[in-house]
Image (tube, rainbow, N blue to C red):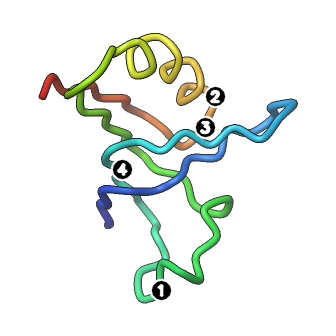
Amino acid sequence: NYVTPGCRVFVPARRRMTCPEPDVAAFRGYPVGRGRRTLNWRHVSPLIVVEVLVDGPPRKDLVRNPPLYWQVPSIAEYWVVDG
């Protein structure tokens, strides 16, 4: 019910707080009508996360991020788009 070009994804059960920021995220059950400034990203998690490869090395999006995103129970799909 909501797609955004910027959010934080909190990865649970990590020793240190880890919260990658995908280029695009799609949510189901997002609290629509609530201002983004008042939203606590720890309480919402996306269904789909998307990274767009543009400038720079793709290591972060292809190597580091996939294992992090798969630790988030709500994420069903991780897309990488070659920009």
**How far apart are labels 1 and 3 at the CA level?**
25 Å
Instruction: Give the residue displayed 58% in from the left and 61% down from the top.
Output: 44
Residue 35, percent from left and from top: 47, 86
Instruction: Give the residue displayed 20% in from the left and 28% down from the top.
Output: 54
Element at label 2: loop
**How far apart are labels 4 and 1 at the CA level?**
17 Å
- The residue identified by callout 1 is 35
Residue 17 lies left or right of residue 57; in this view the side is: right
**How far apart are labels 3 and 4 at the CA level?**
15 Å
Element at label 4: strand
- The residue identified by callout 4 is 25
- The residue identified by callout 3 is 73
- Between disc 1 and disc 3, the foreground one is 1
Task: Please state which amino acid type lies under the numbered disc 3.
Answer: Pro
Q: Is residue 48 above or below residue 42?
A: above
- Quarter of the rendering containing residue 1: bottom left
